[in-house]
Amino acid sequence: MSEAAVAANSPAEGMDGLVDDWSADKQAYHVPWGKAMMWLFLVSDTFIFSCFLVGYLNVRMTTTEPWPVQSEIFALSFGGAPIPLILIAIMTFVLITSSGTMAMAVNYGYRRDKTKTFWLICATALFGAMFVGMQVFEWSKLIGDEGVRPWGNPFGAAQFGSIFFMVTGFHGLHVTCGVIYLMWVALRVKRGYYDDKGFEIVEIAGLYWHFVDLVWVFIFAFFYLL
Amino acid sequence: MSSDAGQQHPLGIYYKVWILLFVVSFFSYMVDYLEFQGALRWTLVLLFMVIKAGFIIAIFMHVVWERMALALTILGPPVVLLLLIGLMAVEGNYTEEARFNYMGHDRDAVALTPADLHGGEHGGEEEAH
């Protein structure tokens, strides 16, 4: 008994720790359950986004129509010559900025600095809303000015539109949900709802937000750059 | 109970990773801006992508500090996706070759750009509004 109690108090690290954590009828994950469940959700979400991206890979490889040149289609002009892909680059920087403010929010949450946590989460949500706004602009430009549709476009392979709307739309939906989720958490932080419960919720919300940024890293590389 | 024993780390490491993500994102944008093509483009884009994803997962999402049981639960299952990617790449390549060889599709077709469609070199003037 006492040996087991000592072992449970100071779990081993590395491979021994892995075996210990799985080899007994006890708790496998030494994290709050909400965090474990968020990770479970994020792993399943990884598979959904991966299915979209692998579908994109297959469609792009099999189509014999030329694939539209993303660099030119997503170019934007500020009075002068169009700058290739500039809107997407700005969106990328906005999302990374929001990821940084979120990481700060998590840190100040654990320091129980409610004011800083509140404002940092608000800043994160604001950058997220900016991202969605730029995405709306991008969609309207593509639909209205360029005539891109899910079933065809004037540039090349028809699948370009369906993949674009599906992948960026699903990602945009995640960002939108994230903004609402973050505002909800921010308000509860401000009202002192977590004073007794602890501030893990900020880290859990942060995991979701970093995941959204992570997905964008892959979309940026595979859809816009390659 | 565990609220103050959660994932708490010095702020410095977040600032460093944050700056790194900006720099690497800028590099991947420059790959497009400087019009690198072919194997060089693929190598650089995928390299920068892996660096960014790795630092976001490891530091921002704290996986490097998590216990191995949780880290493997997170990172293990997605590994099978590599098999799916490999299978779909082989299958896609076969389908494309079959279409070129037996259905008479044009191997040298080139995509149009907004500049082609809107006339002139300034494809951007309509887009500004």
Image (cartoon, coloured by chain):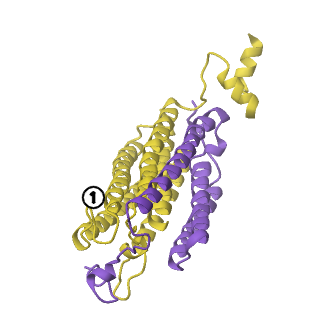
- Outermost residue, top side: A1
Q: Chain of mark 1?
A: A
Task: Give me the residue at 28% from left, 71% from top.
Answer: A154
Residue A154 sits above or below residue A24 on the image:
below
Q: Colour of chain A?
A: yellow
Any idea which chain is the purple one in this picture?
B
Q: Amino acid at mark 1?
A: Pro
Horizontal arrangement in the rendering, residue A159 relative to residue A35 (left or right): left
User: To which residue does mark 1 refer?
Assistant: A150
**Rendering quarter of residue B40:** bottom right
- Residue A69, percent across and down? 41, 72
- Outermost residue, right side: A3
Assign the N terminus of chain B to one quadrant of the image.
top right
* Residue A101 visible in this rendered orientation of the protein: no
The residue lying toward the viewer, choosing from A21 and B36, is B36
The residue lying toward the viewer, choosing from A132 and A71, is A71
Horizontal arrangement in the rendering, residue A135 relative to residue B64 (left or right): left
Task: Give me the residue at 38% from left, 54% from top.
Answer: A167
Assign the C terminus of chain B to one quadrant of the image.
bottom left
- Residue B77, percent across and down? 56, 37
- Residue A170, percent across and down? 35, 51
The residue lying toward the viewer, choosing from A78 and A226, is A226
